[in-house]
Image (spheres, helix red, strand yellow):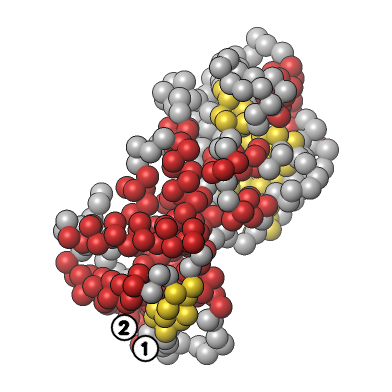
Amino acid sequence: MNLYMPEVETACDIAACFAEARKMSEGEINAPGETSGERRVALITPGRLIMSIPCPSPSAVSEAMIEGVRRIVPPQPKQAITVIAFNDAVTHGALNIQQLNALVPFLGYLMGMAFDGHTVVVFEGHPSALKAGCSDTGVLIVDQRMVDHLQKDWLTVASSATRAPRVLVFGGDGSIAELAPSPGLLDKRPEMRVGDFIRSGQFAAAAGAAATLQRQAAHRSDSSQPIHLELSAAARTGFFHAFYALLGARDAGNVDPSNVGTFNRMVSELQRLMDSQGAGFVSRFNMAYFLANMSQLIPVLVAGEPPEKMVEACGRFGEVADAFQNALERSENATAPNSTLAKSKQDRQGRKPWWKFW
């Protein structure tokens, strides 16, 4: 999608518009048909209408989801969060959560922040609204794709309007950078984990992060090392779903022919994990290889699901990703991989795509 700075309605009281959006996010005022007191993300359109994006129900939110959000914004103190992102929802017919997520790829994180008690208001960052939008903001989140469309001194204007400047730039690769109030000073924050990306609906970022883990495993001289894994009840459910879906994809011919042997060896190991109800040993490479393949398959598995079901499914798959990534990290050792062997494994196993869905 080619982003741009939308034309906006300027004949309105923009400060009052933001104040109303903040109250809507907090649940003090409601959109027609919504339940009083429900927290939500408020998106201000270029026409200065306020769209309400409801948070998931408490039953659909796991501790792991909240932990992913709190790695970005701590639970205390509660923050007024302002987001600069592409907001031309009406023009693009983005009227539900899945469609809005295409405009704002980190929408899942924003919904989590609102659920956790922060107020979250999204707008486009137009010069006529930038200062008012950032006024009294504790955290400003910026979609990196919109930076080139902002005024040149946007960081100075935004920082001068905030009460405690903290500016986070969300990159398309899933990275998060924190900008100092003075332009040009950049502090890279740790990249988010695969499970966090899945839970927030950032499937491309999840697949990219998992692919990195798979390449790292292929580089290691101990890639065949067995690693112990024990799945929680929630992770088992997600793992069983993903495992059978991968088998179905293979049987339907969706595995690249050059990777069928590698895929079948992974299936053989994971079948033993299935038989033992999610407790057993899996080699380092096959653990990472499964995580990479599952991450690529998730968009297919959740396509067309209603928002509540999609959140629940992503929560289960996120639990699986957490379990596999945690096991990989626990098994790390300081031994450097043999470079010749590593290159050979990468050439054999990492050059071609795993799937042919698209």
Where does residue 300 sit, x and y in percent of width and height? 32, 47
Q: Which mark is residue 284?
A: none
Q: Are marks 2 and 1 in contact (CB under 8 Å)?
A: yes
Camera-side residue: 127 or 52? 52
Q: Position of residue 133 (x, y in %)?
A: 71, 28
Task: Tell me the residue at 23%/57% (across/down).
Answer: 249
Q: Is residue 111 left or right of residue 238?
A: right
Residue at (58%, 25%) from the top-left corner? 52
Density class for disc 1 (Cα within 10 Å; few <14, some 14-19, many ≥20) is: few
**Mark 2 to mark 1 CA distance (whole Å):** 6 Å
For the question of whether residue 259 can be seen, the reply is: yes
Q: Secondary structure at mark 1?
A: helix
Q: Which residue is mark 1?
A: 340
Q: Does 155 appear above or below 348?
A: above
Q: Of helix, strand and loop, which one carries label 2?
A: helix
Q: Nearer the viewer, residue 184 or 106?
A: 106
The residue at the point 37 percent across, 85 percent down is 224
Quadrant of residue 34 within the rendered picture: top right
The image quadrant of residue 217 is bottom left
Amino acid type at image mark 1: Thr
Residue 215 can be seen, yes or no: no
Q: Residue 232's x, y, as percent?
A: 51, 65
Identify residue for label 2. Answer: 344
In the rendered image, which quarter contains the N terminus? top left
* Residue 217 drawn above or below residue 35: below
> In the image, what residue occupies the spot 54% across and 49% down?
171
**Picture quarter containing residue 144?**
top right
